[in-house]
Amino acid sequence: MRTVNQFKKNLVMALCTACFFIANPSYAETDDAQHGNMNHAQTNTMWSGIYKGFLPCADCMGIKTSLALNANNSYILITQNTGKSVRDFVEKGKFTWAENANTIVLTSRDGATTHHYLIGDNTLTQLDNHGNKVSGKDAERYILHRKEMVGNDAPNSHGGH
Protein backbone atom coordinates (compact mmCIF):
# COMPACT_ATOMS: atom_id res chain seq x y z
CA MET A 1 0.00 0.00 0.00
CA ARG A 2 2.85 2.35 0.83
CA THR A 3 4.41 1.91 -2.62
CA VAL A 4 1.06 2.70 -4.25
CA ASN A 5 0.81 5.96 -2.26
CA GLN A 6 4.42 6.83 -3.10
CA PHE A 7 3.69 6.11 -6.77
CA LYS A 8 0.66 8.43 -6.65
CA LYS A 9 2.75 11.22 -5.10
CA ASN A 10 5.46 10.79 -7.71
CA LEU A 11 2.88 10.72 -10.50
CA VAL A 12 1.24 13.96 -9.30
CA MET A 13 4.58 15.76 -9.11
CA ALA A 14 5.71 14.35 -12.48
CA LEU A 15 2.49 15.54 -14.13
CA CYS A 16 2.91 18.94 -12.53
CA THR A 17 6.48 19.16 -13.80
CA ALA A 18 5.38 18.10 -17.28
CA CYS A 19 2.80 20.91 -17.33
CA PHE A 20 5.55 23.46 -16.80
CA PHE A 21 7.66 22.16 -19.67
CA ILE A 22 4.73 21.68 -22.04
CA ALA A 23 3.41 25.21 -21.47
CA ASN A 24 6.69 26.69 -22.81
CA PRO A 25 5.99 30.14 -21.37
CA SER A 26 6.94 33.32 -23.17
CA TYR A 27 8.88 35.91 -21.18
CA ALA A 28 8.65 38.72 -23.73
CA GLU A 29 7.32 42.11 -22.65
CA THR A 30 3.84 42.90 -23.92
CA ASP A 31 2.10 46.16 -24.78
CA ASP A 32 -0.27 47.27 -21.98
CA ALA A 33 -2.78 48.51 -24.57
CA GLN A 34 -3.00 44.98 -25.95
CA HIS A 35 -3.95 43.60 -22.52
CA GLY A 36 -6.14 46.41 -21.21
CA ASN A 37 -5.81 46.80 -17.43
CA MET A 38 -3.77 43.65 -16.86
CA ASN A 39 -0.73 44.15 -14.67
CA HIS A 40 2.75 43.02 -15.71
CA ALA A 41 2.59 40.24 -13.07
CA GLN A 42 -0.48 38.80 -14.80
CA THR A 43 1.02 38.80 -18.29
CA ASN A 44 4.47 37.59 -17.27
CA THR A 45 4.61 33.87 -16.44
CA MET A 46 7.71 34.24 -14.26
CA TRP A 47 5.42 33.48 -11.29
CA SER A 48 4.70 29.93 -12.46
CA GLY A 49 6.61 27.22 -10.61
CA ILE A 50 6.67 25.20 -7.42
CA TYR A 51 6.68 26.95 -4.06
CA LYS A 52 7.42 25.24 -0.75
CA GLY A 53 7.29 26.15 2.89
CA PHE A 54 6.36 25.16 6.43
CA LEU A 55 3.32 27.19 7.46
CA PRO A 56 2.05 27.73 11.04
CA CYS A 57 -0.58 25.37 12.43
CA ALA A 58 -2.83 25.82 15.49
CA ASP A 59 -3.02 22.14 16.42
CA CYS A 60 0.13 20.58 14.88
CA MET A 61 3.85 21.27 14.50
CA GLY A 62 3.34 22.99 11.15
CA ILE A 63 1.88 22.51 7.70
CA LYS A 64 4.37 21.20 5.13
CA THR A 65 3.19 22.90 1.92
CA SER A 66 3.98 22.53 -1.78
CA LEU A 67 2.10 24.70 -4.26
CA ALA A 68 2.55 24.35 -8.01
CA LEU A 69 1.27 27.26 -10.12
CA ASN A 70 0.87 26.48 -13.81
CA ALA A 71 0.96 28.98 -16.67
CA ASN A 72 -2.61 27.99 -17.60
CA ASN A 73 -3.84 29.30 -14.19
CA SER A 74 -4.30 25.85 -12.67
CA TYR A 75 -2.67 24.75 -9.44
CA ILE A 76 -1.89 21.73 -7.30
CA LEU A 77 -1.60 22.24 -3.54
CA ILE A 78 -0.14 19.45 -1.39
CA THR A 79 -0.20 19.85 2.39
CA GLN A 80 0.66 17.68 5.38
CA ASN A 81 -0.12 18.49 9.02
CA THR A 82 3.23 17.56 10.53
CA GLY A 83 3.06 15.91 13.93
CA LYS A 84 -0.62 15.15 13.49
CA SER A 85 -0.81 13.08 10.31
CA VAL A 86 1.52 11.52 7.76
CA ARG A 87 -1.18 11.81 5.11
CA ASP A 88 -0.71 14.28 2.26
CA PHE A 89 -3.77 16.27 1.24
CA VAL A 90 -3.93 17.12 -2.46
CA GLU A 91 -6.09 19.95 -3.77
CA LYS A 92 -6.39 20.92 -7.43
CA GLY A 93 -8.11 23.89 -8.96
CA LYS A 94 -7.78 27.18 -10.81
CA PHE A 95 -6.57 30.57 -9.69
CA THR A 96 -7.63 34.06 -10.69
CA TRP A 97 -6.06 37.47 -10.27
CA ALA A 98 -7.57 39.59 -7.51
CA GLU A 99 -8.19 43.34 -7.82
CA ASN A 100 -4.72 43.82 -6.35
CA ALA A 101 -2.82 42.74 -9.47
CA ASN A 102 -0.09 40.96 -7.47
CA THR A 103 -2.56 38.77 -5.57
CA ILE A 104 -4.03 35.48 -6.73
CA VAL A 105 -7.04 33.61 -5.39
CA LEU A 106 -6.94 29.82 -5.56
CA THR A 107 -10.31 28.08 -5.83
CA SER A 108 -10.53 24.31 -5.50
CA ARG A 109 -12.25 22.28 -8.21
CA ASP A 110 -15.33 21.79 -6.04
CA GLY A 111 -15.36 25.48 -5.08
CA ALA A 112 -15.34 24.59 -1.37
CA THR A 113 -12.02 26.24 -0.49
CA THR A 114 -10.19 29.40 -1.48
CA HIS A 115 -6.70 30.63 -0.63
CA HIS A 116 -5.19 34.08 -1.21
CA TYR A 117 -1.49 34.60 -2.00
CA LEU A 118 0.59 37.70 -2.64
CA ILE A 119 3.16 37.18 -5.40
CA GLY A 120 6.63 38.41 -4.54
CA ASP A 121 10.12 37.94 -5.94
CA ASN A 122 10.31 34.10 -6.04
CA THR A 123 7.90 33.97 -3.08
CA LEU A 124 4.21 33.56 -2.34
CA THR A 125 2.87 34.99 0.90
CA GLN A 126 -0.27 33.33 2.17
CA LEU A 127 -2.91 35.92 3.06
CA ASP A 128 -5.91 35.64 5.36
CA ASN A 129 -9.41 34.80 4.05
CA HIS A 130 -10.05 38.49 3.28
CA GLY A 131 -6.85 38.89 1.23
CA ASN A 132 -4.92 40.76 3.94
CA LYS A 133 -1.37 40.07 5.11
CA VAL A 134 -1.12 38.15 8.36
CA SER A 135 0.48 40.23 11.09
CA GLY A 136 2.11 39.35 14.37
CA LYS A 137 5.11 37.35 15.49
CA ASP A 138 4.53 34.51 12.98
CA ALA A 139 3.90 36.74 9.94
CA GLU A 140 7.17 35.75 8.22
CA ARG A 141 6.24 32.06 8.52
CA TYR A 142 3.45 32.45 5.94
CA ILE A 143 5.92 32.71 3.04
CA LEU A 144 6.46 29.96 0.45
CA HIS A 145 9.68 30.03 -1.56
CA ARG A 146 10.00 29.11 -5.23
CA LYS A 147 12.11 26.06 -5.99
CA GLU A 148 14.16 25.75 -9.17
CA MET A 149 13.28 22.85 -11.47
CA VAL A 150 16.76 21.78 -12.58
CA GLY A 151 18.91 18.73 -11.96
CA ASN A 152 18.56 17.22 -8.50
CA ASP A 153 16.08 19.93 -7.44
CA ALA A 154 13.36 18.53 -9.69
CA PRO A 155 10.58 17.20 -7.43
CA ASN A 156 10.06 13.50 -7.05
CA SER A 157 7.94 13.53 -3.91
CA HIS A 158 6.30 15.87 -1.42
CA GLY A 159 8.59 14.75 1.40
CA GLY A 160 11.58 16.83 0.30
CA HIS A 161 10.88 20.00 2.31
Image (cartoon, rainbow, N blue to C red):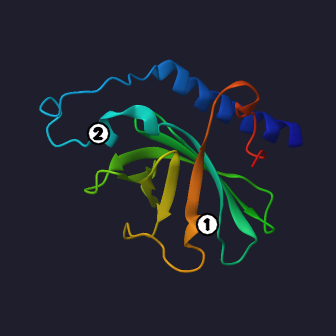
Distance in Å between CA atoms under marks 2 and 1:
27 Å
Is residue 62 found left or right of 21 in the rendered image? right
The residue identified by callout 1 is: 141
Q: Are marks 2 and 1 in contact (CB under 8 Å)?
A: no
Residue closest to the far bottom:
136
Residue 44 image position (x, y, % from top left):
35, 33
The residue identified by callout 2 is: 40
Q: Say which residue appears at 34% left-offset and 42% top-offset.
A: 41
- Tell me the kind of residue under disc 2: His
Residue 3 image position (x, y, % from top left):
87, 37
Identify whether 151 is placed above or below 134.
above
Q: Say which residue appears at 37% left-offset and 66% top-offset.
A: 131
> Is the residue marked by circle 1 packed among few (<14), some (14-19), or many (20+) residues within 10 Å?
some
Identify whether 10 is placed above or below 88.
above
* SS state under label 1: helix
Residue closest to the far right:
2
Q: Say which residue appears at 54% left-offset and 21% top-offset.
A: 21
Residue 116 image position (x, y, % from top left):
43, 59
Of mark 2 and mark 1, the one earlier in the sequence is 2
> Is the residue marked by circle 2 packed among few (<14), some (14-19), or many (20+) residues within 10 Å?
some
In terms of depth relative to the viewer, which is nearer, 110 or 131? Answer: 131
Q: Say which residue appears at 81% left-offset and 68% top-offset.
A: 83
**Residue 112 visible in image:** no
Which label was assigned to residue 24? none
Is residue 4 found left or right of 58 in the rendered image? right
In terms of depth relative to the viewer, which is nearer, 127 or 107? Answer: 127
* SS state under label 2: helix
Place residue 100 in its image quadrant. Answer: bottom left
- Tell me the kind of residue under disc 1: Arg
* Picture mark count: 2
Residue 23 image position (x, y, % from top left):
46, 22
Place residue 7 in its image quadrant. Answer: top right
